[in-house]
Amino acid sequence: MIKAIIFDLDDTLYHELEYVKSGFRAVSNYIADKYPISSEGFYKVLLSILKKEGRGQTFDLALEEFGLSLKEVPEMVNLYRIHQPESFRLYPDAERAFNRLSGDYKLGLITDGISKVQWNKIEALGIKDRFDYILVSDDHGRENRKPAPFLYQKMIEEFEVSPQEAVYIGDNPDKDFVTAKKLGLKTVRIIRQQGMHINKKLSEKYEADYEIESLDELEEII
């Protein structure tokens, strides 16, 4: 019998690209305040680079395109990380899931990333009080980022349930499910049509026990 439901955050409960865009806005405003470059122009270049190259060198490539010094990168990264997200909301099915599940199950959140960044997201989404327990990986050391077992084990211990009494829902097969499955949790991958990992397919070892396209389907599994 399932007693605890544990969620991933990014691209599971909200569209992560919206956070990225919000950070790009903050960075573009900074550049526009400092140089004779329009904020909108710099923002569009960031989006174009993101689409073509991914997130690894976005700021570096944008600065190079405008002939600006790469010395700006550390401040841009810092602004991106500390900015307060705007126009930021849960997926509608996530809101519905919280309303249905709260009270019947213990609800947990496990999210990877820099503590300030992830807590800013949680605050902006207004979901802190939706959960009985929240774990942000870097509050406990970067070495405990998924797929390390620490976060899953700590959540299970906090909830005082067995792994077989818990289900974990995430979107990224690279790291979300392999350890949870080894520990004995039931695992569910949500396939978001706009998610960053929608086309990612790995071996059975890394894939979840179940796949859904909406959290409205969750009760059919648990």
Image (cartoon, rainbow, N blue to C red):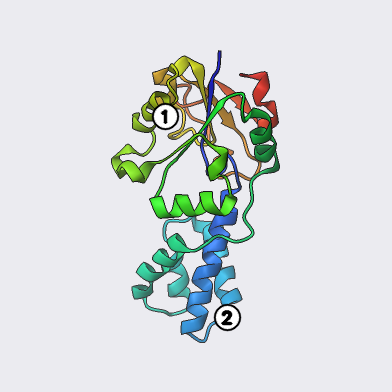
The residue sitting at 62% across, 30% down in the picture is: 102
Q: Residue at x 45, y 25 (%)?
A: 159
**Whole-percent x, y for residue 41 in the image:** 59, 75
Residue 143 vertical placement versus 166 (above, below)? below
Question: Which residue is tagged 1?
Answer: 155
Which is nearer the eye, 48 or 19?
Answer: 19
Which secondary structure lies at badge 2? loop
Which residue shows up at 32% across the image and 37% down it?
144
Q: Residue lying farthest bottom?
A: 36
Tell me if mark 1 has few (under 14), some (14-19) or many (20+) residues whose alpha carbon lies within 10 angstroms of its own.
many
Q: Report the residue marked by disc 2.
A: 38
Q: Quick one: 47 or 99, which is closer to the camera?
A: 99
Q: Is residue 213 visible?
A: no
Identify the image quadrant of residue 169.
top right
Residue 73, compared with residue 125, is above or below; it is below
Front one among 87 and 60: 87
Place residue 111 in its image quadrant: top left
